[in-house]
Every structure is written in structure tokens, then in C-alpha cells.
Image: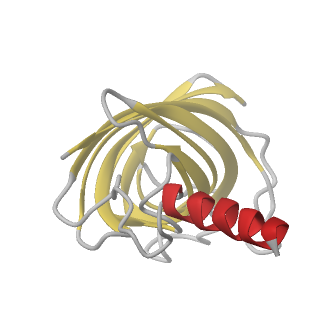
């Protein structure tokens, strides 16, 4: 009986010192928070099972970003797009992907996975058969991980599929698809 009371006392003391799972954890991402960021990355053409991308396209990418959390998990944001193509020739692409969102799995942890989708407009002088004009549309989707710090900038890393086409407005509308690895810094302003 004496050993039972000791074990019971240790269990009760242990439970008393642990934080309750019902206790609210600090939300690192919350409705109303603004976000700012700058990301860069590298991309290369690919055929994801749709589209008719045949040209080898390689580029480096830069994306300034601005967003706001509309729920504790959903961030609506927009980003600028700057592509510096190095393959098949030197060219530039610039645009605005102004309608997008990231849905985060968790809002109370230091890191959280998310899914991303965004759309916008892009101008490019890239001369390949898949693009019939200079002014095109862009559609981006992918997955990422966000590291949220209590102070200062955090990190994001994304793997994206980036589609550029004229949306059937001119010519054959073959479009170009690229897989892009993007990483950068993000500030969550509370």
C-alpha cells in the first residue's frame, strides 16, 4: 500500500507540473496578422501530365510578397514575379501574382506545412514555341513549410508547379510548365 501511495503521489505531481493539453497554446499565426517576405528560387521546365512543354527552360526567380491572415490558418497574399531565364536563351519575365493563398496545417507551432495556390499576370520576352505572345497568365500551386519565430524573420521553403500560358486567347496556347524550388524570409507582423 505504501508503494502504491508513492507511485500515485509521483503521478499526481507529474500531472500537476505538466501543462494541460486543454490550455491554449500561443498562436504564432492568427487572423489579422500581416506578412511580408522575399523569396528566391530556381526552376526548370517539366511536363506534369498535362500541357505540352517541350522546350528546356531554366531560370532563377525572385518574389517579394505581402499578405494577411484572414483566419488562423488561411493567409491571402500576392507576390511580384521576376524570372531571369538562362535556358534556352537569356530572357526576362516579370509580373504580379495578385490573387493567392496559403493554407497552414497548424498555427501554434514553430513550423507548419502548408499548401499554396496563386494566379496572376506575367510579361516575358522568352522566345519558345509554347508561348505565343509577350503578355501571359501564370498559375502556381504547391506545398511548403513555414518556420515561424516569436521575433524577427522566419523562413519558408516551397516546391511549386508554375504554369505560364495565354489562357487560349492567341494561337495554340501550349503553355510552359516549370517546377520551382523557392526559399526565403518572411516576417509575421503581430
Q: Name the quarter where the N terminus is drawn.
A: bottom right
Q: Residue at x 59, y 22 (%)?
A: 90
Residue 99 in sight in this render = no
Residue 116 in sight in this render = yes
Q: From this view, report whether residue 23 is shown above or below residue 45.
A: below
Q: Residue at x 60, y 67 (%)?
A: 12
Q: Residue at x 34, y 37 (%)?
A: 150
Q: Which percent across, then down, holds residue 99?
A: 31, 66
Rendered image quadrant of residue 131: bottom right
Q: Which percent across, then down, holds residue 168?
A: 50, 77
Quick one: which residue is furthest to the front in this view? 2
Left of 12 or right of it: where is 109? left
Q: From this view, report whether residue 65 is shown above or below residue 9.
A: above
Rendered image quadrant of residue 72: bottom left
Q: From this view, report whether residue 176 is shown above or below residue 62.
A: below
Report the number of discs: 0
Q: Which percent across, then down, holds residue 61?
A: 52, 32
Q: Nearer the viewer, residue 22 or 16?
A: 16
Q: Nearer the viewer, residue 51 or 38?
A: 38
Amino acid at each position: 500500500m505504501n508503494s502504491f501511495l508513492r507511485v500515485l503521489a509521483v503521478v499526481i505531481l507529474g500531472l500537476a507540473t505538466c501543462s494541460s493539453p486543454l490550455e491554449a497554446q500561443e498562436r504564432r499565426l492568427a487572423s489579422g496578422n500581416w506578412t511580408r517576405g522575399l523569396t528566391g528560387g530556381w526552376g526548370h521546365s517539366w511536363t506534369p501530365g498535362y500541357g505540352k512543354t517541350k522546350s528546356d527552360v531554366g531560370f532563377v526567380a525572385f518574389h517579394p510578397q505581402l499578405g494577411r491572415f484572414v483566419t488562423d490558418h488561411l493567409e491571402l497574399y500576392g507576390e511580384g514575379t521576376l524570372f531571369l531565364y538562362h535556358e534556352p536563351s537569356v530572357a526576362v519575365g516579370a509580373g504580379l501574382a495578385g490573387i493567392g493563398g496559403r493554407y497552414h496545417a497548424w498555427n501554434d507551432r514553430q513550423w507548419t506545412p502548408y499548401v499554396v495556390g496563386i494566379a496572376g499576370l506575367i510579361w516575358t520576352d522568352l522566345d519558345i514555341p509554347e508561348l505565343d505572345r509577350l503578355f501571359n497568365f501564370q498559375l502556381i500551386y504547391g506545398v511548403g513549410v513555414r518556420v515561424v519565430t516569436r521575433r524577427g524573420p522566419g523562413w519558408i521553403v516551397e516546391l511549386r508547379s508554375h504554369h505560364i500560358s495565354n489562357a487560349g486567347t492567341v494561337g495554340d496556347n501550349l503553355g510552359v510548365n516549370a517546377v520551382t524550388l523557392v526559399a526565403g524570409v518572411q516576417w509575421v507582423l503581430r
